Amino acid sequence: MNLEGLRHEYSVGIPDPRLIRAEGYTLDAALLARPGNVDLQLDLFLDYADNVKLYPDFQEYFRTRKAPTLAVWGKFDPYFIPAGGEAFKRDNPNTIVQLLPTGDFTLETHLPEVVVSMRDFLELTKIR
């Protein structure tokens, strides 16, 4: 929860960490440095278990609604592994999964590719 730790988190799983610009993790570190924010972040980490409890509800939604879904994922993300992205397709045949050669902070290294994927997906599904 400091600058060096955030720099590491932004770069883990990325084949070329030089792609990460300092602005993102530096801003995160500055925001976390405000009084009480580290405790809030730790509370969010601990609360993640409640998200896991809701996974069956999410899966049921995808099975019944079959809403068009785009999951753009970091192929080398150590937290949300590729199998998690691919799992969407088990519950919803209307899912497109795109794995990019990056880690957890996909937008930091592959923003243009994600934008193109989103635009293509919206055009394909006619969602506007």
Image (cartoon, rainbow, N blue to C red):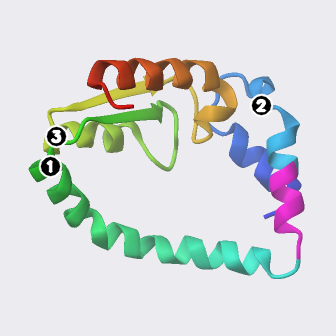
| Contact? badges 1 and 3 (CB < 8 Å) | yes
* Secondary structure that dominates the magenta span: helix
| Tag 2: amino acid | Ile
Residue 49: image location, x then y, percent: 41, 73
Q: What type is the residue that disc 1 sits on? A: Arg
Q: How many marks?
A: 3
Q: Is residue 33 magenta?
A: yes
- Coordinates of residue 76 in the picture (x, y in percent): 51, 33
The answer to which image quadrant residue 109 occupies is: top right
Q: Which residue is mark 3?
A: 92
Instruction: Give the vertical position of 23 relative to 125 (above or below).
Output: below
Please tell me whether mark 1 or mark 2 is closer to you in this view.
1
Sooner in the amino-acid sequence: mark 3 or mark 2: 2
Q: Nearer the viewer, mark 1 or mark 3?
A: 1
The CA span between labels 3 and 2 is 33 Å
Amino acid type shown at disc 3: Asn
Residue corresponding to mark 1: 65
Q: Residues within 10 Å of mark 2 (few under 14, many from 20)?
A: some
The mark closer to the camera, 3 or 2, is 3
Q: Secondary structure at mark 1?
A: helix
* Vertical order, 51 against 61 (above or below): below
The residue singled out by tag 2 in the image is 20
Q: Which residues are magenta?
A: 27-34
Alpha carbons under labels 1 and 2: distance apart: 37 Å
